Image (tube, rainbow, N blue to C red):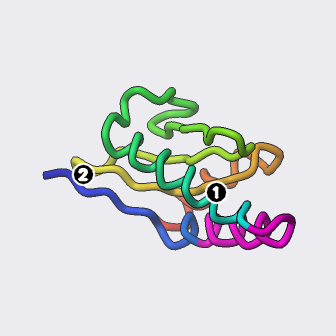
Amino acid sequence: MSSFVVRPDAEADITDAAVWYETQSPGLGLEFLRLVDACLADVDRAPHRFPVIRRNMRRALLRRFPYGVFFVEADGGVEVVACLHARRDPHEWSERLRRDR
């Protein structure tokens, strides 16, 4: 059985974005969370279907929201490293990997 882990930094990314969207329009934060959950389920089911963007880092894009879920395959499972807005520095996830190792 493979493992699926969402790192604390990625959880914080998701929570922060959901709170922000909810302040913009009631219910929008919940819609964001629903689409994140669907994206994470897709990643868990078939991680190889998503493109490698650098070395072993892959990215899954959310529908409707300009966010990407960045993940690596490690030890027979998947680790979600970040969930970042498309306009944020795309290398932030690499800093997180360096910091955690």
Seen at 58% across and 56% down, the residue is 82
- How far from the left and from the top, in percent, is residue 47? 37, 36
For residue 3, above or below residue 41: below
Going by the numbered disc 2, the residue's amino acid type is Asp
Query: Could you say which disc has been placed on residue 75 in the image?
Result: 2
For residue 16, above or below residue 32: below
Q: Which residue is mark 1?
A: 31
Magenta part mainly helix, strand or loop? helix
The reply to whether the magenta stretch includes residue 19 is yes
Q: Residues within 10 Å of mark 1 (few under 14, many from 20)?
A: some
- How far from the left and from the top, in percent, is residue 76? 22, 47
Label 1: which secondary element? helix
Label 2: which secondary element? loop
Farthest-out residue, left: 1
- How far from the left and from the top, in percent, is residue 58? 50, 37
- How far from the left and from the top, in percent, is residue 83? 61, 55
Seen at 71% across and 65% down, the residue is 27
Seen at 73% across and 60% down, the residue is 28
- Depth order, front residue of 55/31: 31
Seen at 74% across and 43% down, the residue is 66
| Position of the C terminus by quadrant | bottom left
N-terminal of the two: label 2 or label 1?
1
Q: How many marks?
A: 2
Going by the numbered disc 1, the residue's amino acid type is Glu
Farthest-out residue, front: 26
Q: Which residues are magenta?
A: 12-26
The reply to whether the magenta stretch includes residue 82 is no
